[in-house]
Amino acid sequence: MRFLVAIVIVMAGCVATLPGDGGITADLAAETARMVVRMRAEIAPTPAPPSDGKCQNCDGLGYVGDGRIKITCTACGGTGREPKSVLVRPCPDGKCKP
């Protein structure tokens, strides 16, 4: 039993550690970043689903729930139609206020 404890202590002390080389770490980081940028360029964005005018949140019903419990859909305001973007403001005359 003592022999086993001595072997464990010797093996724990024999773990090799590499010196901290900043050049290798920087090279690995730069190569990883290059590969990520290259892979993102290869991945095409998913196309938007075709719009049929119905709200995607409530499926055109104007409410969410199982039928017994009905809560007005907050995305479309209860209209059942696809909500307009809140980020794009209509500006027909070209003089929009911020």
Image (spheres, rainbow, N blue to C red):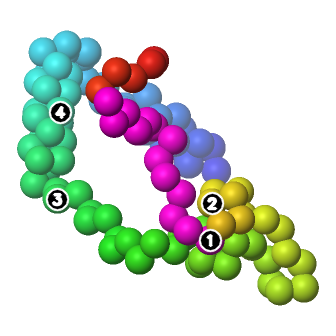
Amino acid type at image mark 3: Ala
Earlier along the polypeptide chain: callout 1 or callout 4?
A: 4
Crowd tier of the residue under label 3, counting other residues whose Cα lies within 10 Å: few below 14, some 14–19, many 20 or above = few
Q: Secondary structure at mark 3?
A: loop
- 52 versus 91 height, above or below: below
The amino acid marked with disc number 1 is Gly
Is the residue under label 1 in contact with that under label 2 (CB below 8 Å)? yes
Q: Residue at x 52, y 34 (%)?
A: 9
Q: Amino acid at mark 4?
A: Ala
Nearer the observer: mark 2 or 4; the answer is 2
The magenta region covers 80-93
Q: The residue tagged with tag 1: helix, strand or loop?
A: loop
Pointer 1 residue: 80
Q: Where is mark 4, residue-wise?
A: 33
| Residue occupying image coordinates x 11% and y 47% | 41
The residue singled out by tag 3 in the image is 44
> What residue does disc 2 label?
76
Identify the image quadrant of residue 60.
Answer: bottom right
* Badge number at residue 34: none
Q: Earlier in the sequence, mark 3 or mark 2?
A: 3
Image vertical order of residue 97 relative to residue 56, above or below: above
